[in-house]
Image (spheres, helix red, strand yellow):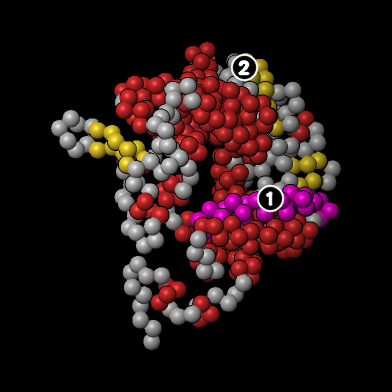
Amino acid sequence: MTAPARPGVNPRDSQGPPDELPGATRPLAVTGAMAACAAMVTGLVILTPLVLVGWIAAPHAGLGLPGVLRTTTGLWLAAHHVGFALEGAGRIGMLPLGLALIPGALLWRAGRWVVQTGQVSGLSEVGYAALALAAPYAVLCGALALASRSALAVPSLPQAVIAGFLIALCAGGLGGARALAPWSSLVRLLPPRPRSIVLGTAGTLAVLAAVGAILAGASLAAHLSEFSALNGALGAGPVGTVLLLLVQLAYVPNAVGWAVCFMLGPGFAFGAGTVIAPTGAALGPLPAFPLLAALPSGAHGSVPGWASVAVLAVPYLAGAFGGVLLVRVAPSPAAEIAPLWGFACGVATGFVVGILAAFSGGPLGSGRLAVVGPSAWQAGLVATLETGVAAAVAAGIANWLLLRREPELAAARAAPGAAGNGLRVRTSDDGDDGHRIFVDPWADEGETRPGARRRAPGPSELP
């Protein structure tokens, strides 16, 4: 009988040779393939009852059980943002982003399982574990795209392979990394400057997403009567109403992305020749989808003048918040350098907003609705300029105030060799004079010696 492992002891050292560990003789590629198959099958099992309920509740003349299975595989591919070509209708590319949470969560768990079962012990090996999961998963997505083809709908094979690989690589890699260390430790692995940019960008995006969600919810609340009337006019019945509600919830992330692009200024379109922006809206006929009741109809100013100014000011406030957060995490030794890193935060924000704009819209056929959603390049460029300029100004001012309030900090950080020879600025609140700042030349010595005990991080090391 094997004795339980002691706390702090590596299980590999206490449970015998590596070939006796469960799963140790299994190659990482085999473990990744097993996890990919499990994630795929679990996702199909989750969606099949929903499609089956809709098939039973709605008229299904000419659609048998093989059609139900084909619809389920098509819905699973749509969760990966794989477009379809419909017979006589054109391409369908505006898909609900909320569905991506299902494969994302399953692949996150699959990545954790691959790391734990495959005996991955270092973060440098997580990338190999993620590739071992993503490669077979992409093959499975391509096989589903080929198997779900019919005379009515043809999913895109290249999109299925590429989207499946990217989602599995990102979600599985993050899940595997999280299985080895908490988020705080993972963030600390980044150098101070990239870490500050990442956290500043996250703060900017959080403000934009929060205000965008509030704006979308307020618009829907203002048009609640139209929403209820359109929902009742469809006559979907109890089961159909529940399924319709689930579909609309899946499109909520799309609505938040459109609201963010609305705040930036360029807005978005719902059909060729249409526009919805803070300065005005021009819309044509809309599909009978209750969530679209939140959009204004006709040609008029979409919001009052004072509200337009407030909405357009949100991206600048979000950028300023990100710039201040950037300086709080890692202040620059020179005041003229901080605006550059603040603008880098805006560039990263614009990149993320552009991707969100690209995936939140898409065509709804080959006719007038072939243009639906925001323009990715316009949203990304405007987000870069607005949030980047605001973040640069805010970072410069915040950094200047910080260095002016604590000149010893600037002198210590600007000292020769302080950044490249292992010197670290540390703070202390002990002493009669209150707050003192000094340079610890031996800060990294305890971390480099084998077997040495790691020092507790000082306040200057915290984000």
Q: What residue appears at the point 34 percent right and 46 percent down from the top-left corner?
A: 443
**Residue 139 lies in what quarter of the image?**
bottom right
Magenta-highlighted residues: 150-177
Q: How would you classify the magenta stretch by its main secondary structure? A: helix
The residue singled out by tag 1 in the image is: 163
Q: Amino acid at mark 2?
A: Gly
Q: Position of residue 55 (x, y in %)?
A: 67, 57
Provide residue 444's location: percent of width, then percent of height: 38, 48
Tell me if residue 266 comes above or below residue 426 in the rendering. Answer: above
Q: Residue at x 76, y 33 (%)?
A: 370
State the separation of the CA atoms marked 2 and 1: 36 Å
Q: Residues within 10 Å of mark 2 (few under 14, many from 20)?
A: some
**Per the image, is 264 magenta?**
no
User: Which tag, 2 or 1, sits closer to the chain's start?
Assistant: 1
> Can you see residue 184?
yes
Q: Which residue is mark 2?
A: 280
The answer, for residue 462, to whether it is visible in the render is no
Residue 218: x and y in percent read 49, 28
Q: Is residue 241 above or below residue 298?
A: below
Q: What is the secondary structure assignment of the residue under circle 2?
A: strand
Residue type at numbered disc 1: Ala
